[in-house]
Image: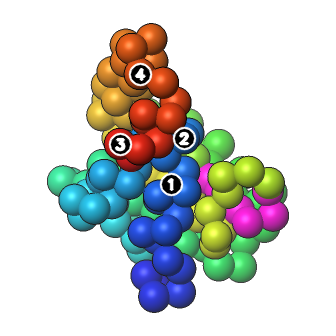
Amino acid sequence: MEEEVNWTEYFASITGVCPWSKAYWAKQKIDIQRWRGPSKITPLGDYVARMWLHPNASGRVLCKIHYGLNEDRPNEEWLYSHPQYKGHSAPAPILIQQDLETLNKARKGNKKNESKISPQTLIGKG
């Protein structure tokens, strides 16, 4: 699965919107799995995020799934990305599972640092 996409390159490319992603990937704190349906979702454990590859899904299907998962799993935040979208989209259709508490701490820390650190510095530290 990981061989199909250069995840190291992808996480390096999104540090402007997700400054901690590259560092977490380097520390092996992001897991990659193939989507097998909501009944097969596993707890994150020591991971900060899990990328669920859903190779044949459209962006619309991913959006629908992610809304349902956010309702059903209140301690997690679910996002999605699809190569059909412009910008910092993932190179493959994915659902992203994150621990809500960990994510909120990272966001809060990033907001405190935004006034002290320029975006160029964040990108360099990603």
Which numbered marker is on residue 125?
Answer: 3
First-in-chain label (3 vs 1):
1
First-in-chain label (2 vs 3):
2
Instruction: Tell me residue 123's x, y (percent).
Output: 47, 42
- Judged by depth in the image, the label closer to the viewer, 2 or 1, is 2
Which numbered marker is on residue 16?
Answer: 2
User: Where does the magenta region start and end?
Assistant: 80-85
* Label 1 secondary element: strand
Name the residue: 65% across, 78% down: 55
Residue 89 placement, left or right of 3: right
Q: What type is the residue that disc 4 sits on?
A: Ile
Mark 1–mark 4 CB contact (< 8 Å): no
User: For the residues marked 2 and 3, what is the alpha-carbon distance in whole angstroms?
Assistant: 10 Å
- Judged by depth in the image, the label closer to the viewer, 2 or 4, is 4
Name the residue: 43% across, 35% down: 122
* Label 2 secondary element: loop
Q: What type is the residue that disc 2 sits on?
A: Gly
* Image: 33 above or below 95: below
Residue 74 falls in which quadrant of the image?
top left
Instruction: List the residue tagged with mark 4.
Output: 117
First-in-chain label (2 vs 1):
2
User: For the residues marked 2 and 4, what is the alpha-carbon distance in whole angstroms?
Assistant: 12 Å
Neighbours of disc 4 within 10 Å: few (<14), some (14-19), many (20+):
few
Question: In this view of the protein, which residue sits in the foreground, 120 or 6?
Answer: 120
- Judged by depth in the image, the label closer to the viewer, 1 or 4, is 4
Mark 4–mark 3 CB contact (< 8 Å): yes
* Label 3 secondary element: helix
Which numbered marker is on residue 96?
Answer: 1
Instruction: Tell me residue 31's x, y (percent).
Output: 34, 66
